[in-house]
């Protein structure tokens, strides 16, 4: 068969340089280089050395034309050996093999005068090019009538320790001008590492999916050049989307974020991209209520040092958020009971919130699936075990070692029975429940290496049909201790509140009793003053001067005001002492009766009154009548200077759903809100003597509201009237 000259091939043929010295420390690498160079350049004489000193001795013996050497050699490194050889034979050609990018080493190699620098891992075209550049004469075989023969590719398996090695071989036969095969050029490629990596990748991807499902987490990858996203199956569910229901992109993610959180979440993303740093963001999912997610991602750079993509995980942190909100609610309730305990409770709540934040597991994502799973497993703050159904521990993370104060080997030897407190006899029942439902969560007592027992929450779920399962253990000793402390503080605070309430009630009763006694004791002197001044006016009135008569009039007015004041004090004490009898009271009817009486007392005043109908409430009829009379009298008094007195009484929307709230609005002189806290104090008045009054009426209103368990407040402005509000509890027992 004549060779086909249309498929010319190039092959290395030596004319002058036919001796090569290979100096590498690894025997397998020596064998590989020897095979490659023998196949590509069969005319070379090859010499091998495993270190720099041996290579220097061999060079002096055989005087090779080309030297191929590694940098990292024992006894004498490759560059030092090359310098010594250069001094002996300046014309020798040097080829350096190295994966180092150290500029110092590269500059040193250039100063020595190396011919070629071949990076590791070695690629055949680069090595052959280096050999060709070292004055190997490359001839076009087609010019001499040598054509490329039939090519053959084969694959074979060879047994080596510890397992099989897969080789792919290929060769090309080269013929001379007469058609006779002269030699062959071949290649060898080891596929074992590639196949092992594929199998490891598939296994690690499966484990990663299981780990993400267990931690209620999903993974994503964001390509910065194409703006494309890749989402794991778990991530669709976390975002509240059906798998593949839309294109996984930045806009799809943004639409899944709650509208109130979008600006903050997008700002976090922009900051991470702008600084080329890690991404850390929390947000709520749109359309799913109050579900919170935590995203953590890190950038991966290309060969130019630029950020090519972000890769990360998304975790459901709703439970942690609910715990944090519940703790804050307890803190606020306790703070409202006793002021001096507020600071201590706030400190405890902050400590608990810090503990919750520390319990959040943050996993760093790596480029390969196996590395991602290992990071999730190793860096979890919770103890994680991979175990068999009958309790044999296969592996454990570092958190488990720290929690039990054991090494991973000790945990595997201890097994399930060696870690659970023997006094906890619920294990069999829990295992049956797990086998029945596939997962279980419960609290157990565990024991450490030193025998100490602690309480922890255990979650166990099956991961395959062979009976392997994950066990996640979380130490809840501190949480239980904090819960017990909070309960103890609640009990203590309740006792202190009861004691303080009893003291205040006793003091109020004492004051009321004192006021009642003083009021009665003051009536007798007032009667004497009134009687004597009346006798003087009757018997000596004609002989008194005008000034004396004026003084008698002022005495009468003063005693009258004093009597009114005493009456109001008695009324105030009676409000605090009178037993209450609750019934349904029609406030609308009472308001109409009171305004009619006010109009009858001063028929010349023009009055416009609006009273809403159907204002029913439960309370003491007598006290509620007194409350309305005092409020309407107050509005009537301070509206006297208006051409038309306008009063409006009706219902107000309650601030609390358990309250019935009412308001009385007037167009009087109003008041300055700066002094609103003085309105309901006894004897406190915001206006001068031009308006009659004792400063007790509104204090009585406040006391009536306190007896009913309600509250009263006012709003107003100078010259624009005032509005008084009072709120009564609905369907509650009053005291």
Image (cartoon, helix red, strand yellow):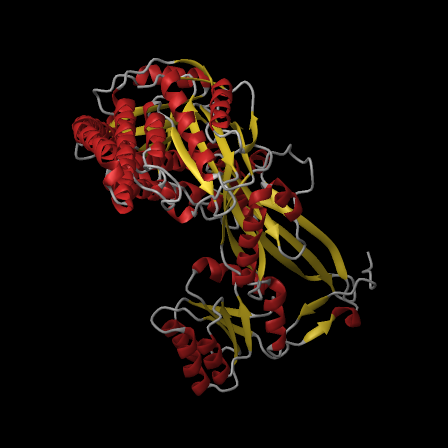
- 601 versus 640 height, above or below: above
Image x and y of residue 343, in percent: 27, 44
- 123 versus 87 height, above or below: above
Q: Is residue 324 left or right of residue 272?
A: left
In this rendering, the count of numbered labels is: 0
Give residue 708's quadrant in the image. top left
Q: Which of 402 and 296 is in front in this view?
A: 296
Task: Tell me if I can see residue 394 in this picture.
Answer: no
- 375 versus 735 height, above or below: below
Image x and y of residue 337, in percent: 28, 34
Residue drawn at x 55%, y 70% is 118
Q: Which of 399 and 98 is in front in this view?
A: 399
Q: Quadrant of the N terminus?
A: bottom right
Q: Is residue 425 left or right of residue 218?
A: left
Image x and y of residue 692, in percent: 37, 38
Q: Nearer the viewer, residue 397 or 199?
A: 397
Task: Tell me if I can see residue 459 in this picture.
Answer: yes
Residue drawn at x 54%, y 50% is 264
Q: Is residue 177 left or right of residue 61?
A: right
Q: In this view, does 42 lie to the left or right of 629?
A: right
Q: Nearer the viewer, residue 377 or 354?
A: 354
Find the residue positioned furthest to the front. Answer: 543
Image x and y of residue 642, in percent: 53, 41
Q: Quadrant of the C terminus?
A: top left
């Amino acid at each position: 068969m004549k060779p086909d000259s249309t498929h010319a091939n190039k092959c290395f043929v030596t004319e002058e340089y036919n001796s090569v010295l290979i100096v590498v420390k690894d025997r397998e690498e020596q064998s590989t280089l020897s095979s490659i160079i023998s196949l590509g350049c069969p005319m070379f004489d090859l010499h091998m050395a495993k270190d720099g000193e041996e290579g220097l001795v061999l060079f002096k013996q055989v005087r090779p034309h080309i030297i191929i050497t590694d940098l990292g050699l024992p006894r004498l490194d490759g560059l030092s050996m090359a310098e010594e050889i250069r001094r002996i034979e300046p014309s020798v050609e040097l080829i350096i093999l190295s994966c180092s990018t150290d500029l110092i080493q590269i500059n040193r190699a250039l100063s020595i005068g190396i011919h070629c620098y071949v990076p590791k891992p070695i690629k055949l075209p680069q090595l052959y090019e280096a050999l060709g550049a070292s004055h190997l004469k490359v001839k076009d075989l087609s010019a001499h009538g040598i054509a490329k023969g039939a090519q053959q590719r084969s694959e074979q398996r060879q047994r080596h320790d510890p397992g099989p090695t897969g080789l792919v071989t290929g060769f090309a036969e080269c013929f001379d001008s007469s058609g006779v095969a002269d030699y062959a050029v071949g290649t060898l490629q080891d596929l074992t590492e590639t196949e092992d990596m594929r199998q490891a990748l598939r296994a690690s991807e499966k484990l990663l999916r299981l780990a993400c499902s267990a931690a209620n987490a999903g993974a994503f990858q964001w390509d910065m050049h194409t703006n494309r996203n890749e989402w794991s199956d778990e991530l669709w569910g976390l975002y509240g989307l059906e798998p593949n229901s839309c294109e996984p992109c930045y806009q799809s993610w943004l639409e899944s974020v709650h509208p109130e959180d979008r600006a903050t979440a997008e700002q976090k993303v922009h900051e991470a991209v702008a600084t080329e740093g890690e991404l850390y963001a929390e947000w709520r999912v749109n359309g799913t209520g109050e579900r919170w997610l935590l995203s953590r991602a890190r950038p991966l750079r290309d060969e130019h040092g630029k950020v090519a993509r972000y890769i990360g995980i998304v975790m459901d942190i709703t439970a942690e958020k609910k715990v944090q909100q519940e703790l804050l609610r307890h803190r606020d309730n306790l703070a409202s009971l006793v002021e001096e305990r507020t600071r201590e409770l706030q400190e405890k709540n902050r400590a608990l919130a810090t503990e919750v934040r520390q319990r959040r597991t943050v996993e760093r994502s790596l480029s390969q699936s196996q590395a991602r799973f290992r990071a999730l497993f190793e860096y979890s703050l919770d103890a994680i075990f991979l175990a068999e159904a009958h309790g044999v521990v296969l592996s454990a993370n570092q958190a488990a070692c720290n929690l039990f104060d054991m090494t991973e080997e000790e945990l595997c030897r201890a097994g399930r029975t060696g870690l659970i407190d023997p006094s906890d006899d619920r294990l069999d029942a829990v295992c049956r429940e797990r086998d029945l439902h596939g997962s279980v969560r419960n609290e157990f007592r565990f024991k450490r290496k030193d025998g100490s027992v602690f309480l922890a929450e255990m979650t166990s779920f099956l991961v395959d049909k062979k009976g392997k399962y994950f066990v996640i253990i979380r130490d809840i000793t501190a949480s239980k201790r904090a819960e017990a402390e909070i309960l103890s503080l609640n009990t203590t605070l309740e006792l202190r509140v009861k004691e303080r309430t009893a003291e205040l009630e006793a003091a109020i009763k004492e004051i009321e009793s004192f006021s009642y006694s003083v009021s009665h004791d003051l009536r007798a002197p007032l009667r004497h003053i009134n009687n004597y001044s009346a006798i003087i006016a009757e018997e000596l009135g004609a002989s008194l001067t005008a000034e004396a008569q004026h003084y008698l009039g002022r005495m009468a007015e003063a005693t009258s005001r004093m009597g009114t004041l005493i009456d109001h004090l008695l009324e105030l004490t009676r409000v605090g002492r009178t037993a209450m009898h609750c019934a349904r009271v029609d406030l609308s009817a009472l308001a109409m009766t009171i305004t009619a009486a006010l109009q009858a007392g001063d028929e010349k005043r023009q009055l416009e009154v609006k009273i809403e109908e159907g204002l029913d409430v439960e309370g003491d009829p007598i006290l509620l009548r007194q409350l309305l009379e005092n409020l309407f009298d107050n509005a009537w008094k301070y509206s006297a200077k208006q051409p038309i007195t306008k009063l409006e009484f009706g219902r107000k929307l309650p601030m609390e759903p358990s309250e019935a709230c009412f308001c009385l609005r007037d167009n009087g002189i109003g008041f300055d809100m700066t002094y609103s806290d003085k309105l309901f104090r006894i004897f406190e008045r915001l206006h001068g003597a031009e308006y009659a009054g004792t400063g007790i009426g509104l204090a009585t209103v406040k006391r009536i509201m306190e007896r009913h368990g309600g509250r009263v407040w006012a709003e107003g402005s100078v010259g624009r009237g005032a509005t008084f509000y009072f709120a009564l509890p609905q369907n509650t027992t009053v005291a």
